[in-house]
Image: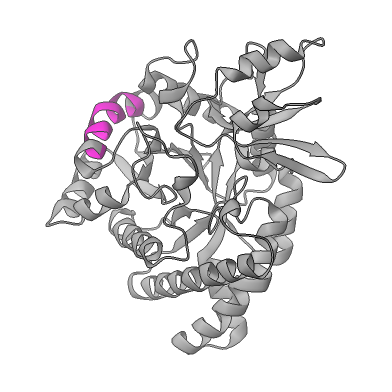
Amino acid sequence: MLLREHFHTTYCTNVHPGADWESTFRALENHLGSIRSSLAPKGAFGLGLRLSDQASRELGEGKRLEGFRDWLEAQQLYVFTMNGFPFGNFHGERVKDQVHQPDWTTLARKEYTLRLFRQLEVLLPAGLDGGISTSPVSYRHWHPEGPARDAILRKGAQAMAEVALELARTEARSGKYLHLDIEPEPDGLLENSADVLRFFGEFLLPIGEPLLSEQLGIDLPAARKVVLRHLTLCYDICHFALAFESPEEVFARMAAAGIRTGKIQVSAALRIRPQNGNREGVLQALRAFDEPVYLHQVTTKTVQGVHTWPDLPQLLENPGEFEELRAHYHVPIFTERYGLLEATQQEILEVLEYLKRHPVCNHLEVETYTWEVLPPGLKEALPASISRELAWLQKHLEL
């Protein structure tokens, strides 16, 4: 939906199982009617579409893509953003670090992303920009620090620069502005603003500027502008909360470097603080969130910087003393407390307040994909939960 004549807000359909196109479309048919009627009964409702590689391939068969576009129009739905981070199945089986596979060193990742952009070009209504969020190049623990890791960053930057070249050609051909939104997360090769700035400054721009200059026949300053137009930041609020960075700090650093924000994923992490000295009770409550499907990195801020445990089991084995931990577990954004645990809802409110003063991005996507693995007692019917999250977001976006 369009709020205050600027923001497009939606939820990410990665909350629904969808390994193939049939199951993806069935989930959209089953859920979107009630969600749209509760949130935008008299207008169009925007959609944050997630397609697996298989679903995307199947959507491209025959006239299926055009048929899907017609169905969206008939239902008063439109797609303005897509999630291209998870490549394969994202539900019902172990995902963990494999969410990064294939990473940006592979041809499969680039081809998948370009296919999604070709499909978004068809689905995107005229006059809107469209973005696709993607992984932070690769997973940190697969690559030792030093020259080997820099080689991975360099290879990923080359692939992303080639995507930017295709997006520039798309805009010249069709007039549709598309951007790749790079999403830092804990234990990704990019996990905070410093990593993003280094990636752009030492890899993306030095590789992308001469490539686009040569291929598009423009000078280097113009090529730099094109790279920065089509390669942008996906600001996941949960992820930057785990990095203990404020929106004012991050957005100011991005603006100074000329880096745009293509999408903001509205998400909440778990905040773990001892309550009246009840450390063991808090940790016991946290154990209910230890599940086998997704990675749930845990961070804490120290005098040396942010310390990260790769997953909840590592933290729970040896938690030590702590004042505050934050866990990468996307919980519903409308609740600030979960019994003895809290959520980083305040960080969401800080981003929304910042956007009211500085609308650096017009794509807002609620991403609470963990509904299936939430502990008992935190679930309600999925369409109702999604509607409640979006209604909460709408309320707090209003002046």
Q: Quadrant of residue 72?
A: top left
Q: What quarter of the picture does the C terminus occupy?
A: top right
Q: Residue furthest right?
A: 303
The vertical placement of 305 against 270, above or below, is below
Q: Left or right: where does residue 18 sit relative to residue 372? A: left
Q: Going by the image, does 170 lie left or right of 260? A: left
Task: Kindly identify the residue that appears in the image at 36 percent across and 44 percent down.
Answer: 49
Extent of the magenta region = 24-36
Residue 180 lies left or right of residue 303; in this view the side is: left
Image quadrant for the N terminus?
Answer: top left
Nearest the camera: 63 or 344? 344
Image quadrant where residue 240 sits: top right
Could you tell me how many numbered marks the image carries? 0
Question: Residue drawn at (81%, 25%), measured in percent from left and top?
Answer: 321
Q: Is residue 357 magenta?
A: no
- Give percent across and percent down for residue 30: 24, 27
Q: Position of residue 25 (x, y in %)?
A: 23, 38
On whether residue 35 falls in the magenta region, the answer is yes
| Helix, strand or loop: magenta stretch | helix
User: Which is more toward the observer, 238 or 351?
Assistant: 238
**Residue 126 makes an appearance in the image:** yes
Residue farthest to the left?
62
Residue 399 seen in the current view? no
> As displayed, is residue 22 above or below residue 286?
below
Q: Position of residue 64 (x, y in %)?
A: 15, 51
> Camera-side residue: 360 or 6?
360
* Residue plotted at (45% across, 55% down): 131
- Which x, y percent locates residue 308? 69, 40
